[in-house]
Image (spheres, rainbow, N blue to C red):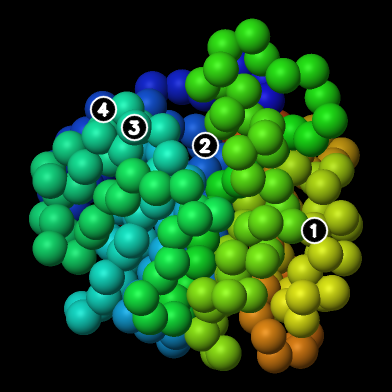
Amino acid sequence: MPQSYFQFKQFRIGQHQCGMKITTDACAFGAFVANLLQEYAFHPAIVVDVGTGTGLLALMLAQQLHPPFRILALEMDEAACAQAQENFAASPWQPHLQAIHADVRRWTCQQPAELIISNPPFFHGQLASANDKKALAFHDQALNLEELLCFANEHLAVAGWLAVLLPQQRRQEFCHLALRRGFHLLGECQMYAHAHKQKPHVVAGIFSRQPTIPRRIKLVYRDEQGNETPLFRKWLSPYYLYL
């Protein structure tokens, strides 16, 4: 992913300020999922965040969900998991959050999850980074899309949702794999970094086992003048201190 996608932002955890290193794409993804949860009046009690990193998506959802709920944040990198634990402890939702150092392929959820959310490794079959941690984060050496769907098929409740963020070039592949597992597209958000971009660079998808007409949304981060668009500001203002 281009380095320009990564930046330090002052992130809001309730009324607290947090200096997490986050990505705009991940924040937009979390905001999209939170928005659709509200739109469909869906209130998951058990959420599993696969590959939580430092806990960004788990914290965004915790800020929007109504108790009782529990978010299990899985992370196989020990240092990232420790950072997620610190971020959870600093938040008002600590009782609802649990960072778990585990490999999702060997971990079992004790009860069905009503929402599984994941920002999985982006690149497949491309040159891996010389840095092992970057390779782990950006390549599907640790968990590929088929394994993610297998996990969802095993642990997702019958009426549950699977939310995934993917690059545009892997959208069709994932939708095909998901359909083979019985997952249908419920909602989709195509994300454009700038208004002049002709194609989205990432796509967020929410899948369920019930066939339906998908809710499709286009999110442009910045307009022709470089300013955040109204929809971007609406979705991200609960989380960004500067909006």
Residue in the picture at 25% in, 34% down: 82
The answer for how far apart the CA atoms under marks 1 and 3 are is 28 Å
User: Looking at the picture, which amino acid does disc 1 mark?
Assistant: Phe
Helix, strand or loop for disc 4: loop
Few, some or many C-alpha atoms within 10 Å of disc 4 (few <14, some 14-19, many ≥20)?
few
In percent of width and height, residue 20 lies at: 31, 30
What residue lies at 34% left-to-right and 32% top-to-bottom? 78
Sequence-first tag of 3 and 2: 2
- Relative to 48, say whether 2 is above or below: above
Q: Position of residue 161 (x, y in %)?
A: 56, 76
Type of amino acid under label 3: Glu
Q: Quadrant of residue 66?
A: bottom left
Mark 3 vs mark 2, foreground winner is 3
Q: Which residue is mark 1?
A: 174
Task: Compute the Cα span from label 3 to label 2.
Answer: 24 Å
Q: Which residue is mark 3?
A: 78
Which label's residue is closer to the chain start, 4 or 2?
4
Q: Are marks 4 and 3 in contact (CB under 8 Å)?
A: no
Residue type pointed to by label 2:
Thr
The answer to which of marks 2 and 1 sits earlier in the sequence is: 2
Q: Earlier in the sequence, mark 1 or mark 4?
A: 4
Tag shown at residue 24: 2
Which residue is situated farthest in the top direction here?
130
| Other residues around mark 3 within 10 Å, as few (<14) / some (14–19) / many (≥20) | few
Decide which of tag 4 and tag 3 comes sooner along the chain.
Answer: 4
